[in-house]
Image: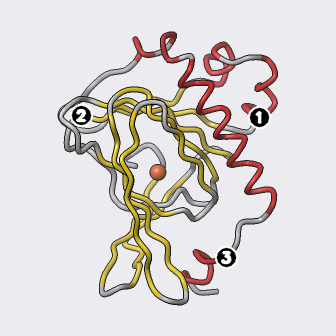
């Protein structure tokens, strides 16, 4: 199976439910941000990422969401102006993220039979994006103020691929362990 076939395949039903469950968790964690924003650090030398322990995440959420949380992993991220990710996927994880403070710009790249399609959107505080496995995007803080976001992955993020768009083709450029730079 080619990479373009994988990227253009419709998501399986379970992947759809996983990513919508992740969206609910991300929105609920964003709504509870007052209880975790004190944890956030801003690092000029590189983006700050923090894996929230399952017990800490559960304490922030209504019990009705604990079943969804059981198969998920929660990361808190901060973004100083100009900080961002490479173009990447999330391995076989689905997920969602919510912008809690500031504004993030998301570039989405999809490869299909007719080549590469790109879109970009500014995501202000309160916006939630959810995605299935093999979703390829790049997130950057193009604003002048720091940004904070909360990310939920189901199953937990283990690795990601990085990509580049070259000549109208999406090329995989590497594979990285989760939490290093994504
Ligand atoms: Fe991502």
> Residue 9 shows which numbered tag?
3
Q: Quadrant of residue 55?
A: top right
Q: What secondary structure is found at the residue carrying circle 3? A: loop
> Residue 156 shows which numbered tag?
none
Task: Please tell me which residue is depicted at 38% across the width and 29% down the height of the picture.
Answer: 148
- Residue 85 % position (x, y): 33, 51
Left-right relation of 64 to 160: right
Task: Please tell me which residue is depicted at 81% across the width and 60% down the height of the picture.
Answer: 13
- 3D distance between C-alphas at marks 3 and 2: 35 Å
Q: Which mark sits nearer the N-terminus, 3 or 1?
A: 3
Q: Is the distance from the Cβ of mark 3 to the nearest ligand 1 atom less than 8 Å?
A: no
Instruction: Kindly identify which residue carries mark 2.
Output: 80
Task: Please tell me which residue is depicted at 44% across the width and 68% down the height of the picture.
Answer: 109
Instruction: Kindly identify which residue carries mark 1.
Output: 68
- Residue 173 % position (x, y): 37, 72
Q: Quadrant of residue 43?
A: top left
Colour convention:
secondary structure
Q: Which mark sits nearer the N-terminus, 3 or 2?
A: 3
Closer to us: 161 or 145 = 145
**Depicted 7 relative to depicted 154: above or below:** below
- 3D distance between C-alphas at marks 3 and 1: 25 Å
Task: Please tell me which residue is depicted at 58% across the width and 44% down the height of the picture.
Answer: 96
Left-right relation of 182 to 96: left
- 3D distance between C-alphas at marks 1 and 2: 31 Å
Q: What secondary structure is found at the residue carrying circle 2? A: loop
Label 3: few (<14), some (14–19) or many (≥20) C-alpha neighbours in 10 Å: few
Closer to us: 153 or 131 = 131
Q: What secondary structure is found at the residue carrying circle 1? A: helix
């Amino acid at each position: 199976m080619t990479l373009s076939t994988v990227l253009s395949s419709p998501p399986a039903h379970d992947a759809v439910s996983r990513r919508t469950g992740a969206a609910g968790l991300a929105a609920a964690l964003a709504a509870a941000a007052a209880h975790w924003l004190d944890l956030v650090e801003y690092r000029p030398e590189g983006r700050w990422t923090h894996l929230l322990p399952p017990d800490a995440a559960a304490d922030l959420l209504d019990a009705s969401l604990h079943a969804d949380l059981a198969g998920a992993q929660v990361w808190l991220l901060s973004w100083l102006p100009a900080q961002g990710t490479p173009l990447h996927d999330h391995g076989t994880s689905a997920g969602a993220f919510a912008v809690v403070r500031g504004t993030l710009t998301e570039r989405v790249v999809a490869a299909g039979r007719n080549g590469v399609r790109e879109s970009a959107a500014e995501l202000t505080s309160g916006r939630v994006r959810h995605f299935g496995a093999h979703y390829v995007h790049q997130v950057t803080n193009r604003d002048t103020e720091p940004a904070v976001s909360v990310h939920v992955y189901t199953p937990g993020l283990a690795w990601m691929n990085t990509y580049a768009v070259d000549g109208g083709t999406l090329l995989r450029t590497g594979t990285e362990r989760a939490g290093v730079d994504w």
